[in-house]
Image (tube, rainbow, N blue to C red):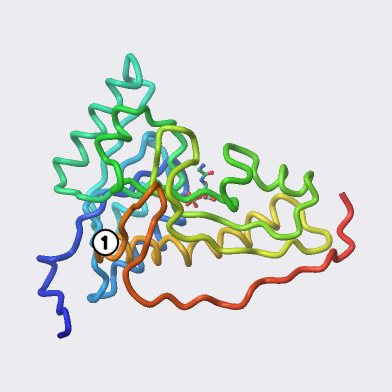
């Protein structure tokens, strides 16, 4: 039996939370432009009113909301407003896409297994900021990016998808970040598609996909003479 999506009725409405340029948001919106994609954009929310991604989303005709965290007395008040804005737009899934505010347990628990994040490292390696420089300093030969369901601890939670990227001779944090970003743009839509289609379940804090998954050959990288 083939499952056919009827109009947008069965699509999971998805809120995208950003803080800056929003290139991952753009990759998600582009993927959602496919009529067969099981999710659709509900709203783009930024904690920074000046975020470039917010005006881009507005130009695409997507609902946008700026919730400036500096206007709120504490994290709970900010997150209450965030939660309400997501509900007001009928979103069932939330994608953090370069959203640079830590979220407390109250918010994270309310959206458990419906709240995703992308991080530019192969988690659990290098959580937090400055990931590319830290990976270079550590002499890593393979870096990458991860999409995961969010848990309270920063950049933690069941991993939904990862992509590996080779470190090349002469790489700087900037050149590495640019190549990892290209991989981010591939895995976030992939992870959202799997989650929105209902193909993911969580067992013992591990994400499991129902259905066939293509596993590519391993990426093998010899030490290419990169100097630290
Ligand atoms: C991306 O590289 C994303 O992985 C990272 O911020 C960048 C946002 O870029 N997120 C984190 O570091 C979260 N811990 P974008 O605004 O162009 O999507």
Q: Which residue is mark 1?
A: 196
Q: Identify the image quadrant of residue 145.
A: bottom right
Q: Relative to 211, is 177 on the left or the right?
A: right
Q: Relative to 213, is 140 on the left or the right?
A: right
Q: Secondary structure at mark 1?
A: helix
- Residue 147, relative to residue 154: is it above or below? below
Q: Identify the image quadrant of residue 50.
A: top left
- Residue 183, relative to residue 131: is it above or below? below
Residue at 38%, 48% in the rendered image? 204
Q: Position of residue 40 (x, y in %)?
A: 23, 61
Residue at 28%, 48% in the rendered image? 114
Q: Position of residue 68 (x, y in %)?
A: 35, 28
| Frontmost residue, 225 versus 208 | 208
Report crowding for label 1: few under 14, some 14 to 19, many 20 or more residues within 10 A (C-alpha).
many
Q: Position of residue 185 (x, y in %)?
A: 48, 63
Q: Relative to 132, is 204 on the left or the right?
A: left
Q: Position of residue 158 (x, y in %)?
A: 43, 49
Residue closest to the far front: 204
């Amino acid at each position: 039996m083939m499952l056919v999506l009827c109009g947008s009725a069965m699509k999971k409405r998805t809120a995208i939370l950003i803080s800056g340029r929003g290139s991952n948001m753009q990759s998600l919106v582009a993927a959602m432009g496919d009529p067969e994609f099981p999710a659709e954009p509900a709203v783009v929310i930024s904690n920074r009113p000046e975020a470039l991604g917010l005006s881009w989303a507005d130009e695409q005709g997507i609902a946008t909301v700026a919730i400036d965290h500096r206007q709120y007395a504490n994290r709970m008040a900010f997150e209450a407003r965030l939660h309400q804005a997501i509900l007001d737009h009928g979103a069932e899934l939330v994608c953090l896409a370069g959203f640079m505010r830590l979220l407390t347990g109250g918010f994270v628990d309310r959206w458990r297994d419906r709240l995703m994040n992308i991080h530019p490292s192969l988690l659990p390696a290098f959580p937090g900021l400055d990931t590319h420089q830290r990976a270079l300093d550590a002499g890593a030969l393979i870096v990458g990016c991860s999409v995961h369901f969010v848990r309270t601890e920063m950049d933690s939670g069941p991993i939904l998808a990862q992509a590996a990227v080779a470190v090349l001779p002469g790489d700087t944090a900037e050149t590495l970040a640019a190549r990892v970003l290209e991989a981010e743009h591939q895995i976030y839509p992939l992870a959202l598609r799997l989650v929105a289609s209902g193909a993911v379940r969580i067992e013992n804090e591990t994400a499991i996909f129902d259905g066939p998954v293509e596993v590519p050959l391993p990426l093998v990288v010899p030490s290419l003479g990169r100097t630290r």
